[in-house]
Amino acid sequence: MKIINNLDNLHIQEKTAVAIGKFDGVHLGHRALIDELIMAKEKQGLATVVFTFSPSPAEFFGLSDNKQIMTGEEKRYILSKLGIDYLIEFPFNKETAATEPDVFVSDILVGKLSSAFIVAGDDLSFGKKGQGNIKTLQDNKSKYGFEVKEIGKICLDGEVISSTEIRRLISINDIDRASQMLGSAYFIKGPIISGNRIGRTIGFPTINVAIDEKKVLPRFGVYFSEVEIDGEKHFGISNIGVKPTIEGENAVSIETYIYDFDKDVYGKDAIVSLVAFRRKEQKFDGIDALKNQLDSDIAAGREYFRI
């Protein structure tokens, strides 16, 4: 997947199918748009393009807390896995925000992206003051010769799927429901960093992954997890939090014990997917008490995963 985040490089010559949206979380609603792109590629031979604004208009205008279900790197990872050819992270600033909707269509969607098919949700807005919408695309399709498809809200068990609802579910620790709406397990992706190595000294070697401060997190605590490193999947048990038992620890991270695994993987990327909540994070009286609890947690994980 080619990532374009500079206006100077924004020019695709081959005919494209374009999905426009925020794509925070790349949830089932977003995937309905992506499914349309994949079908357009299969049937018409169009290159697939996901078009997003960076930062989002809500973030730029201070209308959100900037918290994200997926970081930029996580979003790129998922979209690449889904088979997208181009990801546009369109720079959103005072100048681009003032673009008239019709000019956005003619200069960007047609002139820069060679759009032959455009799909978006029914809440689409773009251009100056967000005045561009699905109707703007419909009004211009004959003039420029592209197709337009509008996708309505996608529901799960009668409930509308939205990034706002998924953020709420994560914040109240309903990881299972959030993952259902996402279409895959809630995960944290990042490089494996060097920790304090205390886990190794007490018989529980772990990997540590730093967490982006913009990432929406569930309750601090211990989770049964699945871990992917170098394309290989493993079972694990993860702690999200600040490790209060360890002196001097205060940065939020995710630390994971991987079952039956003892490789040097520092510097590699890990994808840690949360499967189920085990217990809340707590401070123990000392290392021995922590070790006893870890013994119990790891045994519970073996039972959960049946390994």
Image (tube, rainbow, N blue to C red):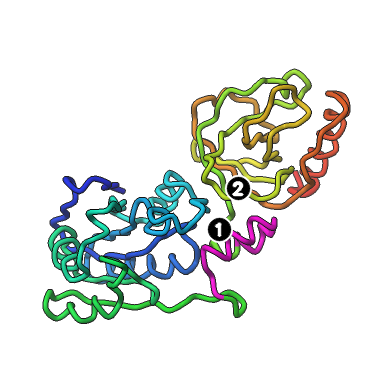
Q: In this view, does 154 lie above or below 5?
A: below
The answer to which of marks 1 and 2 sits earlier in the sequence is 1
As measured in the structure, the alpha-carbon distance from the residue carrying label 1 to the one carrying label 2 is 9 Å
Count residues near mark 1 (Cα–Cα under 10 Å), then give few for <14, some for 14-19, many for 20+.
some
Q: Which mark is residue 184?
A: 1
Looking at the rendered structure, the kind of residue marked 1 is Ser
Residue found 38% across the figure and 53% down from its top: 60
Q: State the quadrant of the C terminus.
A: top right
Front in this rendered view, residue 42 or 95: 95
Residue found 23% across the figure and 61% down from its top: 98
Front in this rendered view, residue 81 or 13: 13
Residue position marked by numbered label 2 in the rendering: 273
Q: In this view, does 285 lie above or below 107?
A: above
Horizontal side, residue 305 vs residue 135: left or right: right
Residue 72 location in percent, x, y? Answer: 42, 46
Pointers 1 and 2 in contact (C-beta within 8 Å): yes
Q: Give the range drawn in magenta.
A: 160-179
